[in-house]
Amino acid sequence: MHSTMTVLTGDDEPASTPPRWDPPDNEVPAILEPVILVATDEAAATLSSVRVFSTGVEITVECRRRTPRLEHRRARLFFEQQVYTGVELADGRRVIAARPSRHDGGFALSQRSGGGDDQVVTFVYWLAPAPPPGDLVVVVHAVDLDLPEARATLAAADLATARERVVELWPWAALPKETYVPPPEPDPPAGGWFAEVEPPA
């Protein structure tokens, strides 16, 4: 089996552009090192994963509680509120994750997924389009963990290097339109109760 993989560079101009609201499914992203945002004896918030694609950056925020809240009326409740998450671009623009997403100059930080248990929970965000050259600051405030607002700077050089390491598996193409036509419903057996209720069309 033969396949061709292409390393994307900043000069590449793909023939077609994947949708900006999701990571492109034809790429293998470059992954940056995890970052501890803030930690105490009882809780912590980290950037457990930062995955760089050609069209944006996927950011995973992981929050940990040392002991479960068993005294709470809902023992499995980890957070009563959403974790506040945002980014500051190199040119000073700020983008906040919200529902619906708040846009700033065409940029959006959308929560794609999240989940966990009463001690560890993750939130996955998608920043698109790709941020401008320069540092990218990620700001997180896990209020329900009694943690202070924290931030981590993703260095411009690291982001640029990661961008060069993104691998395109195959050219992106939109999915073809659905052509499946379901078969007609079978007629009920003749002479029975079902045929009386639902006669043949």
Image (tube, grey):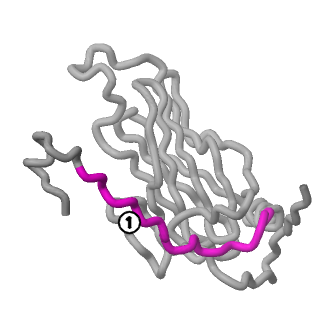
Which residue has dot 1 on it? Answer: 101
Residue located farthest toward the right when viewing the structure as drawn: 2
Total numbered circles: 1
Camera sees residue 155:
yes
| x 49%, y 35%: residue | 63
Return the x and y of residue 74 as percentages of the image width and height.
25, 23
Please identify the quadrant where the N terminus is shown: bottom right
Please identify the quadrant where the C terminus is shown: bottom left
Magenta-drawn stretch, dominant element (helix, strand or loop)? loop
Magenta stretch holds residue 104: no
170 to the left or right of 137: right
Q: Nearer the viewer, residue 19 or 101?
A: 19
Measured along the vertical axis of the image, is residue 116 above or below residue 180? Answer: above
| x 44%, y 37%: residue | 115
Q: Which residues are magenta?
A: 167-187
Measured along the vertical axis of the image, is residue 186 above or below residue 131? Answer: above
Which secondary structure lies at badge 1?
loop
| x 57%, y 70%: residue | 175
Q: Nearer the viewer, residue 155 or 184?
A: 184
Camera sees residue 157:
no
125 to the left or right of 34: left
Return the x and y of residue 156 as percentages of the image width and height.
73, 66
Residue located farthest toward the top when viewing the structure as drawn: 71
10 Å crowding of disc 1: few (<14), some (14-19), many (20+): some
| x 85%, y 69%: residue | 6
Return the x and y of residue 148 as percentages of the image width and height.
44, 41
Identify residue type, mark 1.
Ser
Magenta stretch holds residue 170: yes
Measured along the vertical axis of the image, is residue 62 above or below residue 88? Answer: above
89 to the left or right of 112: right
Return the x and y of residue 101 as percentages of the image width and height.
38, 66
